[in-house]
Amino acid sequence: MFRCIFVAVALMSMALSAWAAPKEECDTVANGQQDDVVISLITCYPGPDVYELYGHTMLRVQHGDIDMVYNYGIFDFDAPNFIYRFVKGETDYKVAGYDGAYMLVGYRSRKVVEQQLNLTSRQAMQVLLALVENARPENATYRYNYVYDNCATRPRDIIEGVLGDKLHYGEMHDTLTFRQEMRRYNANYAWQQFGIDLVLGSGIDYTLNYREQMFVPMVLMQAFAEAGVERNGGLVPLVTDTRVLNNGSDSGDILPPTPAWQSPLAVSVAVLVLVLVMSWLDVRRGKVSRWTDSLLFGIAGLCGLLVFFLIFVSTHAATSPNFNGFWLHPFALLPAVLVWIKKAKRVLYFYHFANFAVVFLLLVLWPLLPQVANAAAFPLMLSLMARSVSYILVYKEQCRTTRANTDK
């Protein structure tokens, strides 16, 4: 999922070695031996790594002696410029079918659930043919999207495409946004959620319908468990049998919560306290602490480069509009550098005046904005404001002193 991946490049060889199996299976079905084709939804619960936190979904096809698993979470981390292309939004993932014997590889410590789907022989064949077609080399690559097009939505779309309007989901359990859903699974990973809240904008803060919530594998599993299919004038369950293939915790095999004193909020408050102390000392002595400004605004500027890249260059969903760009931006690199140049004092004065005004307005207006902020962002915003205020006060005092000495 949001990187719901478990099979990396190592499994590609398995997928290739199993390539002949889908054709054999299709030939068998085409010859009329369809009765024992079984399609199952496989749901893997969250794992400890950040790309495993939302779980994973696969489709399993069993037919006679053939057991295949289709995985839409294949990616090649060693591909040229992978990290740059991922950040830019060029997230090319692949689907591959491989022997079911390898299905639990990488999931031994996590709960894995199989739901056998209540499909007719014809419907099962349609699902199989769709999977085989998707897995062909010319079709296998697709543009992954962490909320709209991922390892959970692809299998869902195939099942929906086969069943059409005969498929009926149950009632939605929670009214959530994408961000709220993400926070549920990132509860123990405060720093990851902090990063998500900084780089993803208002596009993940609208209320989701039930189908949109199924970007999370466990939500899709629950939706299928409660769904019904029209058949013979009535409604039958979509899932006929549920089995636990691998025991594990319902909360997944995740790490313990981030200690409170190590959380982003605790660190940002500590930064604010230090900045307030340094700013008070600067005003008292009438001199700007250049190292403080270089460090604080330098980090803000570097983070701003990433935020602006995601806003204006990346094609990722929900990175724009992002109101964090009003306080995290590349222009913050100016005070980090110009503070060391004596002739730039007046330029810095205007920068800090504008910075204080913009960040102040952002703080005041944030409750009215369509974007939810991470609480840890506010102390950092106040820190930038505090440094701007201290610079303005010191600059004015220096100007007053200079005029007084000139008058003498």
Image: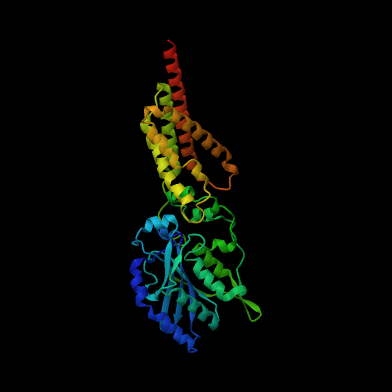
Q: What quarter of the picture does the C terminus occupy?
A: top left
Residue at x 56% of width, y 37% of height: 361
Query: Number of marks in the image?
Result: 0
Q: Residue 262, how many percent across, how many down?
A: 40, 44
Position of 13 with respect to 243 (left or right) is left
Left/right placement of residue 86 relative to residue 215 reads left
Q: Residue furthest right?
A: 233
Q: Measured along the vertical axis of the image, is residue 298 above or below residue 278?
A: below
In this rendering, the answer to whether 32 lies above or below 253 is below
Q: Residue at x 35, y 70 (%)?
A: 11
Q: Where is residue 325 in the image (x, y as percent from the top left)?
A: 49, 44
| Residue 34 coordinates in the image, percent (x, y) | 50, 86
Colouring method of the image? rainbow
Locate residue 21: give its quadrant: bottom left
x and y percentages locating residue 364 in the rendered image: 57, 37
Residue located at (64% from left, 81% from top):
232
**In terms of depth relative to the viewer, which is nearer, 199 or 309?**
309
Of residues 318 and 107, the one drawn nearer to the viewer in this rendering: 318
Residue extending farthest to the top is 408
Whether residue 196 appears in this view of the structure is no
The residue that appears at 51% across and 37% down in the rendered structure is 359
Which corner quadrant of the image does residue 337 belong to? top left
Along the line of sight, the residue nearer the viewer: 389 or 63 = 389
Q: Is residue 310 visible?
A: yes
